[in-house]
Image (cartoon, rainbow, N blue to C red):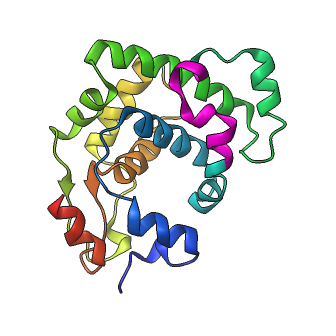
Amino acid sequence: MKRCTWATSSQSEEKYHDEEWGVPLHDDQKLFEFLILEGAQAGLSWSIILNKREGYRSAFDNFDIRKISQYSAKKIDSLLLNPEIVRNKLKINSTVTNAKAFLKVQQEFEGFDRYIWQFVNGKTIQNTWANASQVPVSTIESDALSNDLKKRGFKFVGTTICYAYMQAIGMVNDHCVDCFRHSMIAKL
């Protein structure tokens, strides 16, 4: 079975690629989880974050947005000692900041899902890349998303992070055309 080249170096990457990456997501809690994980990945490899994913779920109350939005300085200090996550104060603080901003967006748009998918007119952008070198690191849509998220107070949401987020949650189908998942995702 042919896969995207980035997904062939570990079992966890292969499983993530085969089961999650690019599948259109519309569940707000999962959308929040991916937003936090993509931000945590900044400057690191995705495989590091993937291997710490369960640690993130445990440390951050299974990505309970309301609980995270109320984390105290004491809770943040305890997270900085947790080896199961990336112990970066800016990234941990941004998780709390992003939870608060996420709740505001949910209220304004009656769900984060409604908000986020407007950047692609509610439909997955179906790309047809022949190889991984053609896949961009950002697009006009990720620029617009990044700028809007920043205006709303979100952190760790640069255009490259936003594009990776869009790929992860299925706003774009960036599986290469020879990958077995490309046509599967296109049918969703």
Q: Is residue 83 magenta?
A: no
Secondary structure character of the magenta stretch overall: helix
Q: Quadrant of the C terminus?
A: bottom left
Question: In the figure, residue 85 lies in which quadrant?
Answer: top right
Q: Is residue 127 left or right of residue 6?
A: left
Q: Residue 95 location in percent, x, y? A: 59, 29
Q: Residue 80 location in percent, x, y? A: 80, 34
On screen, 71 above or below 28?
Answer: above
Q: Quadrant of the N terminus?
A: bottom left
What residue is drawn where x is 43% and y is 34%? Answer: 29
Question: In the figure, residue 89 lies in which quadrant?
Answer: top right
Please provide the residue range marked out in magenta.
Answer: 55-68
Q: Is residue 62 magenta?
A: yes
Q: How many marks?
A: 0
* Residue situated furthest right in the rendering: 81
Q: Nearer the viewer, residue 43 or 7?
A: 7
On screen, 150 above or below 158?
Answer: above
What residue is drawn where x is 63% and y is 50%? Answer: 54
Q: Nearer the viewer, residue 153 or 96?
A: 96
Q: Residue 120 location in percent, x, y? A: 20, 41
Q: Is residue 6 left or right of residue 126?
A: right
What residue is drawn where x is 72% and y is 15%? Answer: 72
